[in-house]
Structure formats: structure tokens, C-alpha cells
Amino acid sequence: MSSPPPTLDGILHRQDVWRGRRHQGMPHTGVDSGYALLNAELLHGGWPRGTLIEICQKPFQGDWQLFLPALRVHNQGVIALLNPPAQPFSQAFIQANIDLERLLVINAPDNADFLHCFSEMARSDDCAAMLAWQPRKGLSYSNLRKCLLAATLSNAIHALFRPWAAQRESSPAALRISTKYIDNELEFFIFKQKGILRSRQPQPVRLPLPECWQAAQPYCALDHSDIARNQSAGASALNLKAGT
């Protein structure tokens, strides 16, 4: 005897069926970002794995450090830094409890070399996370598509950092975020997230910057009374040593 056909209500209550704007029933496979406000906006409750995350940022920003909490969760496997904009500062990783032996720095300035390295690392079972910065010549849609397809072959975190202007371009990335600094906060704007239908314009999320990110005060803002006392104490010590 054949079983009765499924009802619509029964289908909608299945755990593997997603109902448009609702998060209920979606599997939570994301990696905790370390920021509750950001997790609440991400579909899987954290950074998605096995796909491409795109961060559009202004020059000379340290937004990659937002992935440090997630890298600590992934405490096994290689962390690949592909085309980092500067020499990685080892002390920052040590203070974040990231084992330096896990880091693999790859420089691939040409597009062909970049795509090859990205694909090979994405396919590797030993790669827990990859933070990549696009080459100076930029990446075409087909290039980005290759990165996305490679990222789906593993369960790692794959983040691609692109210039601020790239948000005006089409991209197949599953998650696209633009970031900028406002005072002592970092503003996140999620303008694309695969799996979410939006009926209204998404609102930006502001995260307070960790103290280690905040810029040191300029000289004119320092307490000059302390500086003057230290200078006076130093001069007195020199005078005593000289016998004056």
C-alpha cells in the first residue's frame, strides 16, 4: 500500500525546507564570528563555510582581524594568507592565540597565479581558512566564479577582500559585505546574502572596535603635564650625574 502524498503543511515543517524570509528550519552551520550583533544578521548564525565571503573595504583597513575569533574556533589546519597587503605582524597572531606554525603566506600578484593558488588551497583538506586579497588588476566575474566553485569543495572559511568600489560590480559570492570606520566603530553593511529575500533595505550593523584597533592619541592630545614631569625628572638626573 502506497503512502499518502505529502501535504503542504507537512512540507513546510520539514527541517530541510526554508521558507523565504524566515530563518526557522535553516541548519546553523556557520562559525561563530565572535560578535553577537553580526551573528544575528548572518543567516547561519556566523561566518558561512564552504562558500565565498566577499569583503569590500577602503584602503589600509584591518578588517581581516574580524576573522580572528573564528580562526581560534578552527584550531586545527592551515590558515592561508593569499596576497596580504603587508607583511603579517607575528605578535598580533600570538596575542590572538593563533599558532604561527599554522600560517601560510602566499604571494601571487598575477591573476593566473592567484586563481591557481586559491583553487589549490580551497581544495586542500588541510586548509581551515583562507583570507585572500585580490590582485591589483582585479577579478572578473568568471574569475570570482572559479573562486566560488573551488570554495564549495571544502568546509573551510574563504574570505576575499576587494576594494570599496567593487561593491558596484556583480559577484557570485554568497555573502557580500562592505565595511568602513566611523569614529571608534566598524560599520558593516550586508548588501547580499544568499538565502535571504529582503523586502526592505538592510540596515548597517555597527561593532565597537577592540581597544587594540583604536588609534593612539596624537601628541597634541596627550597629557603634557606628565610629559613635562618626566622630562624634568630626566634633566635632574643628568644634572646630578654631571655634578651640577
Image (tube, rainbow, N blue to C red):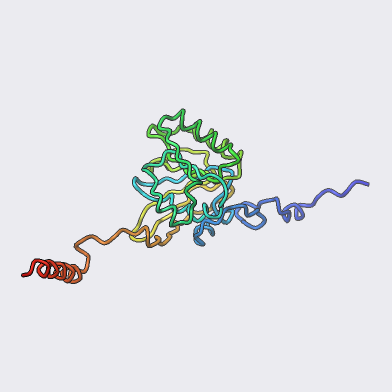
Task: Residue at 54% x, 59% y: name it.
Answer: 40
Quarter containing the C terminus? bottom left
Question: Which one is nearer the viewer's eye here, 128 or 215?
Answer: 128
Question: Which one is nearer the viewer's eye here, 98 or 56?
Answer: 98
* Residue at the extreme right of the image, as rendered: 1
Could one spot residue 142 in this view of the protein?
A: no
Q: Which quadrant holds residue 235? A: bottom left
Residue 134 image offset from top left, x and y in percent: 43, 37
Q: Count how many numbered circles sit on residues in the image.
A: 0
Residue 102 image offset from top left, x and y in percent: 51, 46
Task: Residue at 20% x, 70% y: name it.
Answer: 226
Could one spot residue 56 in this view of the protein?
A: yes
* Residue at the extreme left of the image, as rendered: 244
* Residue at the extreme top of the image, as rendered: 112
Depicted 5 relative to depicted 169: above or below = below
Q: Which quadrant holds residue 136? A: top left
Depicted 125 relative to depicted 92: above or below = above
Q: Which quadrant holds residue 223? A: bottom left
Residue 155 image offset from top left, x and y in percent: 60, 45
Horizontal side, residue 219 vs residue 199: left or right? left
Residue 53 image offset from top left, x and y in percent: 51, 45
